[in-house]
Amino acid sequence: MNIYDISEQAGVSIATVSRVLNGSGNVSEQTRQKVLDVIERNRYTPNAFARSLGLNTMTMAGILCLDASDVYLAQAVYYLERELRNNSYTSMLCCAGHSHQEKEEYLQLLLSRNVDAVFFIGSHFVEASSEANRYIEEAAQKVPVFLLNEELAGNNIYSILCDDYMAIDDMTNLLFSKGSRHPVLLYRDLSFSGQRKIGGFLHACREYGLKDAEHRMFSCPGPLEETVQILEKVHEDGIAFDSVVAVDDELATGAVKYALRNHLRMPEDLQVTGYNNSVLATCSTPEITTVDSQLEFICSTAVAQMVQVLQKQQVPSRTMFSGCIVENLTTRK
Amino acid sequence: MNIYDISEQAGVSIATVSRVLNGSGNVSEQTRQKVLDVIERNRYTPNAFARSLGLNTMTMAGILCLDASDVYLAQAVYYLERELRNNSYTSMLCCAGHSHQEKEEYLQLLLSRNVDAVFFIGSHFVEASSEANRYIEEAAQKVPVFLLNEELAGNNIYSILCDDYMAIDDMTNLLFSKGSRHPVLLYRDLSFSGQRKIGGFLHACREYGLKDAEHRMFSCPGPLEETVQILEKVHEDGIAFDSVVAVDDELATGAVKYALRNHLRMPEDLQVTGYNNSVLATCSTPEITTVDSQLEFICSTAVAQMVQVLQKQQVPSRTMFSGCIVENLTTRK
DNA sequence: TTGTAAGCGTTATCAC
DNA sequence: GTGATAACGCTTACAA
């Protein structure tokens, strides 16, 4: 069943059918109804491929992220898909692995399907060497590229992010103001976002007068149990700490686990803070004080910018939101 | 840059270029190299839309689920996308809302983009009345439909699921064997999966000789805090319980929260079990005993079956896996 | 207001 | 082994 069949049954030309389908006007109400009837009766739906070929767009955006089952990334995927759909775009999802080759390969996969734009979610795509970022720049020559929580300067590349530096700076200061004297930082890796969070921690510590902040930061790239072990080790090594600043909620649950196992009261003996305001923060007992990293804003802004870019409008190459501390039970009143 | 440009530069016909692109043989090694060189030099990639139009497929599958940010659904999306990609299919994600209309609408959206198959994730699509399931059957007339953790009989409809009934039955029996005498069940809703889990609980209780099992089941459709309140209420109402069987890990974290707030020791005073073996079970302290619902198997099986169906091979209309209990710290040794 | 016809960029069926 | 050429099903000037 194609547009010719419909035109024949309706006794009009395919051009008229097309006009009815696309509401392009210039069709008398009478013919319109006649055509609509035939379409209805035959439950005809236009062929998306032919349409795409003619228009050179399928109104589909590509979403690239590492592990879509991660609570944070899953939330981002959800918001993005919703916003895209609200703007008549469908979403093609692609989860890359950690290797550079895979990222490049899966990006190519998205591009080869002629998506209209690509969204990179998370801080794991931009690397230190500009050589390694070439693949992103090349993609941007074909379609607009949106980096969510990451930053890269370049033509047709747009970064939308949360001010992680400031948020962790604020959070660390909040802990100081609530009586903490010896905070430690748990970070996952040196990703773009990771580095900024570390920066915020160091800044706050320096401002406060803490000299050894560099030695109070610990990398926890592994599974949860490893995070707990690392804190045990820190304690055994004689590094005293009365608060843990974690760069994500999962690491924070590790700190909570450490506290509960060692019968430390929260927030009296140990204060803990997380990041992302995810389900992990609220499912924890006690509920973890965390940062709302404005993910929903980031996603809706990114989609709005995509629409504008595709309409050849000017949009800022970098948009930054401020995080917002959500105080729960792992920090003092 | 299209196939004509390449053919011209290479001094061959477009047919030959096409043959080289698709490795359809019947091209001399010499011409092949010549064409490949031109392709390489121009960084030419074939137009996906034109290709799709000719072949009438874009090798893309549709994934429909309610809330892709839910830990369980997000995990499913991740596994599905990975398996699809491994089989050269891309994934179009669409998150429907709870209303019937939205589900129908978003399914149409997927179909209108000519996906090759549709995967429904989760137990929220099939309804009691066959009238309400008409839209699924109609979809199955166009493309094969795969229901993950749900069941519906029909042509071109394939159900792949975990035996939730048996798993909860087993889990409840495990609690009895570990000394529980007064279990309660926390369920979310009467979805397909929800009903089966309830059935398993009731069966185990009856077998054990518990008469009032029907009055020991509580619906917790709301947010976490509400779940805790419901347990408080149950306690206040004088319904004694020494174990909580929750139909998902989030509900189980609610029970853990209740226990910790009331200074009940786990597992001595209260045993708690969850479902899905998600990050919530392990992030909780104590770690929650839960059911591995074989989601990864379910997803890879579904994709394997899709490939077979599209090759006109016969596949079972219903595939069932057994859940697997993962004992952690909220149940006794 | 409506119809004709060209184009979109492939794949595939023929001949040769 | 290679080359014309006809689909594939739409959109959209342009003509009427």
Image: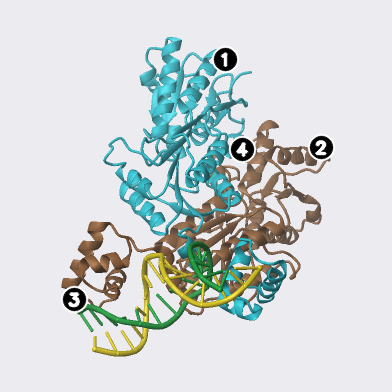
Chain colours: A brown, B cyan, C green, D yellow
Q: Are marks 3 and 2 in contact (CB under 8 Å)?
A: no
Vertically, is C7 above or below B61? below
Give the number of the disc on residue B124: none
What is the residue that sits farthest to the left in this orientation? A30
Q: Earlier in the sequence, mark 4 or mark 1?
A: 1
Which mark's residue is nearer the viewer, 2 or 4? 4
Which of label 3 and label 1 is nearer to you? 3
Residue A143: give x, y in percent of width and height: 56, 72
Measure how far apart labels 3 and 1 are at the Cα level. Answer: 76 Å
Q: Residues within 10 Å of mark 1 (few under 14, many from 20)?
A: some
Determine the residue located farthest toward the top in the rendered image. Answer: B209
To which chain does the residue with label 4 belong?
B
- At label 1, the amino acid type is Lys
Report which residue position mark 2 lands on.
A236
The kind of secondary structure element at disc 1 is loop
Q: Chain of mark 1?
A: B
Distance (Cα) linking label 2 and label 1: 36 Å
Q: Which of the pair B104/B7 is nearer the observer?
A: B7
Alpha-carbon neighbours of circle 2 within 10 Å: few (<14), some, or many (≥20)?
few
**Regarding mark 3 in the picture, which secondary structure is present there?**
loop
| Nearer the camera: disc 2 or disc 1 | 1
Which residue is under mark 1?
Answer: B178
Going 20% across and 70% down the picture, which residue do you hit? A11
Mark 3 — residue? A28
Q: Is residue B32 above or below residue B307?
A: below
The amino acid type found where label 3 is placed reads: Ser
Amino acid under disc 4: Cys
| Viewer-closest of B83 and A170 | B83
Q: Residue at x 48, y 32 (%)?
A: B319
**Is residue C14 left or right of A216 when viewed as pictured?**
left
